[in-house]
Image (tube, rainbow, N blue to C red):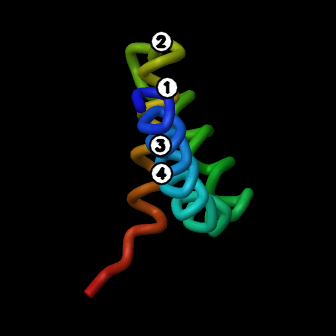
Amino acid sequence: MKRNLAIIAGLVAMAAMLNVTPGLAAVSQKVRNACERQAELVTPALRASEKEAYIANCLANATATRR
């Protein structure tokens, strides 16, 4: 029974990831490059994990829908 539950949970997680992927694909390379350049200019310099978070936030802001 536990194995079936684990398989179902895995399938649900995979389905959730597939639903997110098209949104990530909508970000153009131009926007991604701009966010990476902005992350490089932050002072003091960001650590790798901070830089990744900064870029992700920048991409989210660039793709956010506005009402």
Residue farthest to the front, as pictured: 1
- Which is more N-terminal, label 4 or label 2? 4
- Which is more N-terminal, label 1 or label 4? 4
- Mark nearest the camera among 2 and 4 is 4
Q: CA distance from mark 1 to mark 3?
A: 9 Å
Q: Which residue is mark 2?
A: 47
Residue 12 badge: 4
Task: Name the amino acid type tagged 3.
Answer: Ala
- Mark nearest the camera among 4 and 1 is 4
- Which is more N-terminal, label 3 or label 1? 1
- Mark nearest the camera among 3 and 2 is 3
Q: CA distance from mark 4 to mark 3?
A: 24 Å
Task: Name the amino acid type tagged 2.
Answer: Arg
- Mark nearest the camera among 4 and 3 is 4
Residue 56 badge: 3
Q: CB under 8 Å between callouts 2 and 4?
A: no
- Residue drawn where x is 47% and y is 67% of the image: 63
Q: Which residue is mark 1?
A: 51
Q: Nearer the viewer, residue 9 or 27?
A: 9
> Residue 49: x percent and y percent?
47, 18
Quarter of the image for residue 60 reads bottom left
Task: Name the amino acid type tagged 4.
Answer: Val
Disc 1, SS: helix
Q: CB under 8 Å between callouts 1 and 2?
A: yes
Disc 3, SS: helix
User: On the picture, is 53 further left or further right than 52?
Assistant: left
Residue 55 vs 12, above or below: the answer is above
